[in-house]
Amino acid sequence: MRSPIPDYLTEVLDSTREDASGNVADYIPELARANPDVAAIALATVEGSVYCVGDAEQEFSIQSMSKPFTYALALADRGTEAVGERIGVEPSGEAFNEISLEAGTGRPLNPMINAGAIAAHSLVRADSAAERDRRVLEHYSAFAGRELGIAEEVFESEQSTGHRNLGLGHLMKAFGIIDDDPVDVVNGYIRQCSVAVTVRDLALMAATLANSGVQPVTGQRVVDAYATRHVLSVMTSCGMYDAAGDWLTTVGIPAKSGVAGGIIGVLPGQVGVAVFSPRLDAHGNSARGIRMMERISRDLGMHLMEATRPSRSAIRDHRVETVRGEDVTVYELQGDLVFVSTESLIRHAVENPPTTSVVAFDMHRVDEISDVAKKMSAEAARRMKLDGHRVVLIDPNEVLPSFDLGDGTTPEYFASVADIDVGR
């Protein structure tokens, strides 16, 4: 059986293919040369599963998606109180490059706009600009789980047009927000925006935030849980700039966009998602990427206001039982079935395919099952049937009554494994 998740992500990609609205960023010469038609999606779970579709190997610059990760490093180095004295946490309601400084203090309103991100970069502890750049790159690499590099052509291109950011740097230096040479700080900020990534890298970076700061593949704690919560809170209210309200009501997860066409989203405790499409809308966010994220959030029930209990492993036990002389593969499930716990179950079945004709899913310890978990389970069961298995449900509490597999059929129901009619 193949997992249905890559097929679903491909369908999302295909369903947005006709969206050619927006334009590539033309104020940075290197970004203006981007192919507007490339697109990709990646999804990474907190257990370390990664699914990628589309132009997933295409590298592009991280741009403003770097901001939450540098902010996390500044919080780790300085603490929330010291960082809060230099950078606020209030939404600006303005574009990413506006001069949104607090009256009288010169403090940037939040770390997701350029002024706040430049200030955050300056707060990374280092004895020199070069050491600061190195620490930032190592920090991003730890989030991604591999060594990342700088797209030098993007850095040089962006540096040649970075006059507004230099102006912000000098202004904050005058207010005492930045202690170091503003030219060095702004150049370092431009370098962090020029880090080359793929959607897979970004999905894993987002999944690290979803996993309370622990990289789900390497197991490395990159940032502590408190700082992660703080970063995600600011991403929720400020990550999408002057479209933050629309984003929160429609997609409903902490997110950050970048003008190269990427968007990352984080569902705490479950998944990190990354999309890529270079054409931007009027707010500087990927136009097609917004549609992809809206669809994924709606289909997978990711909105933060759709309250569910914390997810855990769906599988309590996986065994082979003998029922009246015939072996039966039994998956004993537990708790609430949501996207990430159901993905874990499907992945387990893909990696450890049943060897018996009859496959039973024991639901008697399952409390609730979300709509997306129902759809995923139905597709997985349908594919098991196509592989020649007879799928039955043990559901004495009727957690999943009238379960349509999507092909007009339903599985057989029994009160217990011992009751399965193996002779059919």
Image (cartoon, rainbow, N blue to C red):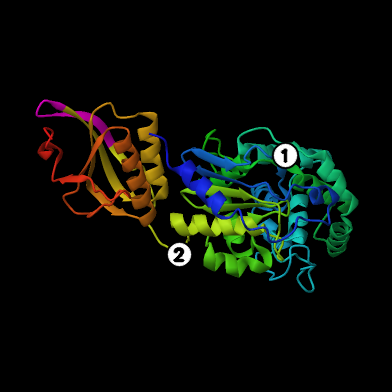
Q: Is residue 424 left or right of residue 35?
A: left
Is residue 223 visible in the rendered image? The answer is no
Instruction: Give SS at disc 2.
Output: loop
Question: Where is residue 171 drawn, in percent x and y?
Answer: 86, 63
Q: What range is drawn magenta here?
A: 317-326
Instruction: Give SS at disc 1.
Output: helix
Residue at image location 69% in from the left, 37% down from the top: 138
First-in-chain label (1 vs 2): 1
Residue depth check, mark 1 versus mark 2: number of the one nearer the observer: 2
Q: Is residue 391 left or right of residue 22?
A: left
Q: Are marks 1 and 2 in contact (CB under 8 Å)?
A: no
- The residues bearing labels 1 and 2 have C-alpha atoms spaced at a distance of 34 Å
Tell me the crowding category of disc 2: few under 14, some 14 to 19, or many 20 or more residues within 10 angstroms, Cα based.
few
Q: Which residue corresponds to mark 2? A: 305
Q: Is residue 137 left or right of residue 327?
A: right
Main SS of the magenta part reads strand
Q: Which residue corresponds to mark 1? A: 137
